[in-house]
Image: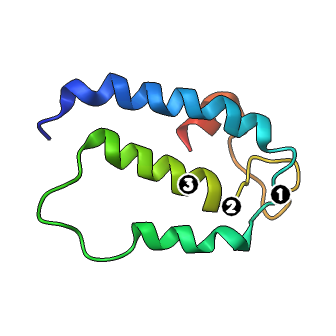
Amino acid sequence: MNERDQAAAALEMVARAAGPYLESLGERPVHDHGTDGLLDLLDGPLPERGEGTLDSVERLLHVGTEAATHSSGPRFFHFVVGGSTPAAQAGD
């Protein structure tokens, strides 16, 4: 809560990661089970003190772009997504 001054930097990190991630969706499998171990980086009890905004966003980007289900890619046919506009994708 005391790192509001980090908001712009955190959003810039996400913006920088978004381009390469979106460009890679055509080659990515919907889910790569070989990256499931990365989910362990998000497991465990919450610490008394956080790691900070930028470290947390960096970890989420690393795990999320690799271990997530890539439902925005061309190989995902599981369900109908309600919003497929760029704004809806960014919101997701």
> What secondary structure is found at the residue carrying circle 1?
loop
Q: CA distance from mark 3 to mark 1?
A: 16 Å
Q: Amino acid at mark 3?
A: Gly
Checking the image for residue 64, the label placed there is: 3
Q: Position of residue 22 (x, y in %)?
A: 72, 36
Q: Amino acid at mark 2?
A: Thr
Q: Residues within 10 Å of mark 3 (few under 14, many from 20)?
A: some
**Residue 66 location, quadrant:** bottom right
> What secondary structure is found at the residue carrying circle 2?
loop
**Residue 31 location, quadrant:** bottom right
Labelled pair 3, 2 in contact (Cβ < 8 Å): no
Towards the viewer: 78 or 72: 72
> Which residue corresponds to the image point at 82% horizontal and 59% vertical from the top-left?
29
Q: Is residue 33 above or below residue 56?
A: below
Q: Is residue 50 above or below residue 91?
A: below
Tell me the residue that label 1 is attached to. Answer: 76
Tell me the residue that label 2 is attached to. Answer: 69
Q: Earlier in the sequence, mark 2 or mark 1?
A: 2
